Image (cartoon, grey):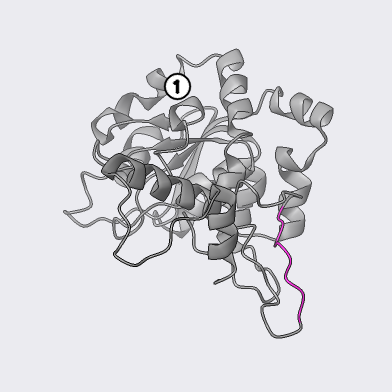
Amino acid sequence: IRLPTPPEGHPCGPLCGRTSLETLRRLSPWALPAAAQEAQLAKVRPVRFWWVGAVRRSFAFKSSARPNLARHHVGRPGWMVIDTQAGKLALERAPVPPMAEALASADFCGSPLGWDFGDSDRYLPSMMYGCIPVFFHGSKEARPLEEVLPWDDFSLRVGVEDIGRLHEILAQYDHARVVAMRTAMGTAWQRMLYTSYSRGAGAGSSRRPMSYLGEDGRRDAFDGVMEVLRQRLAKRGWRRLPGSSPPAATAADDDDAARSQL
């Protein structure tokens, strides 16, 4: 989960598909009223799978997801897979479209590990535009807030060794199933955002949620982290330190108190 957005100016950056907050609000299905949102989620999208990124040529990188995506799926009809390190000529033949528009036009979006095997953040803008994230992590890699989110309802997990047949795997998902997964994303995208992280923390200033798409922040990433911690404490058995006060009466009280310290 990304850290809270800095309060000054509410920059959106990679979260919005490396574009503006205005573009996010124009293209995201989650910005629409209920009836229009349902119709938007049910539309047939022109791109089956999208991933654009740099592929390193080092030996250590050879067995990771990025080179395998480029090796097996660049040029596949109906797919948009572009290696931005392939050279100027290759990029002229397959120019990189604006990221936000591309995400909003695809059924599935790749979310491999980063340039130096760091955590991928592609799942986040993918969800904001209703594109089903495809993870290529190892079996021990957890997805964000996996303890409280039903990721299998709205994302896929594919082993690196299976990337060569990714087109066969995705062929098993007909339009009705894709729409169901997109719709399931509607219960989770707010959990990716720190909406309740307030700006204007100075003395005498007002504190207000930094809403991206009109969400109120009650079920945001901060609330998700608190829920994970509550579940872990419950599993281990809650034990107070000697002389400490009893825990707050409600989970909401705990969250409000913690937010006031941000």
Mark 1 falls on what kind of element? helix
Give the residues in magenta. 205-212
Instruction: Give the vertical position of 89 relative to 242 (above or below).
Output: above
Residue that appears at 47% across and 43% down: 51
Q: Residue furthest front?
A: 243
- Residue 84 in the image: state x and y as whole percent: 44, 55
The quarter of the picture where the C terminus appears is bottom right
Q: Quadrant of residue 65?
A: top left
Is residue 248 left or right of 18 when viewed as pictured? left
Q: Position of residue 104 (x, y in %)?
A: 65, 40
Residue 97 at least partly seen: no
Q: Is residue 137 above or below residue 254?
A: above
The percent coordinates of residue 159 (x first, y second) are 28, 32
Rendered residue at 70%/62% (across/down) = 210
Tell me if residue 211 is in the magenta stretch: yes
Looking at the image, which residue is at 37% across and 26% down?
A: 166
Residue toward you, 29 or 230? 230
Q: Which quarter of the picture shows residue 241? A: bottom left
| Residue 209 within the magenta-colored segment of the rendering | yes
The residue under label 1 is 170
In the rendered structure, which amino acid carries the disc numbered 1? Leu
Tell me if mark 1 has few (under 14), some (14-19) or many (20+) residues whose alpha carbon lies within 10 angstroms of its own: some
Residue most extreme to the left: 59
Relative to the observer, which residue lies in front, 207 or 13? 207
Q: Nearer the viewer, residue 129 or 248?
A: 248
| Left or right of 199 on screen, residue 74 | left
